[in-house]
Image: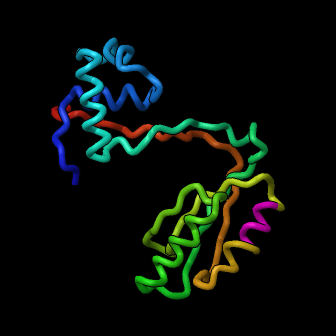
Amino acid sequence: MRGIELDRYDYQILEALQKDARATHQKLAQEVPLSASQIGRRIQRLEEAGIIQGYHIALRPDLLDLSVTAFANVSLERHGEASIREFAAAISDLPEVLECYAVAGEADYWLRIVVQDLPSLSRFVMNKLMTLSLVRSVKSTVALESIKHTTRLPLQPPGR
């Protein structure tokens, strides 16, 4: 639950920033019918409310010698609160894990992993994931090709 009300201008600003987070307030004012200073104040309010968490760059992993993306289903031995915190802390320390989700179903967690090659994936699973004391099993799937990858949210302004 968010603490502020958003109007159509806020949604327009967010959509424009999702397309180009480097856009200046002046450039945003060309898309959103507000002055640059009004846009700046709204962006600051969205940042303070935590709706805008930060600004990031998108890198091409394949051009940085990180050509293997894998998804791992991880099941834990124990499921108490302390175990969950311990697992979360351990996963946070693994730079190969880009995303981690607690899930319902056969596995307890889904991980998105990026590594250099298949031998690197094998070493990561065997020497890092499987050595975590809480991990009961890991089932990995290697992505053959990325069809769609985006960080843009499907924003719906009020009244739409």
Q: Quadrant of the C terminus?
A: top left
Residue 151's x, y, as percent?
48, 41
In the image, what residue occupies the spot 44% across and 84% down? 82
Is 153 above or below relative to 10?
below
In the image, what residue occupies the spot 31% across and 47% down? 50
The residue nearer to you, when weighing 26 against 9, is 26
Residue 139's x, y, as percent?
65, 71
Is 9 situated left or right of 113 in this image? left
Is 49 situated left or right of 72 in this image? left
Residue 12's x, y, as percent?
29, 26
Q: Which residues are magenta?
A: 120-126
Is 91 above or below relative to 82?
above
Is 116 above or below relative to 78?
above
In the image, what residue occupies the spot 70% across and 72% down? 128
The residue nearer to you, when weighing 25 against 110, is 25
| Quadrant of residue 110 within the rendered picture | bottom right
The residue nearer to you, when weighing 85 against 109, is 85
Task: Point out the residue furthest to the right here.
Answer: 119
Is 72 inside the magenta-drawn segment? no
Q: Quadrant of the N terminus?
A: bottom left
Is 23 situated left or right of 9 in this image? right
| Quadrant of residue 96 within the rendered picture | bottom right
Of helix, strand and loop, which mostly describes the magenta segment? helix
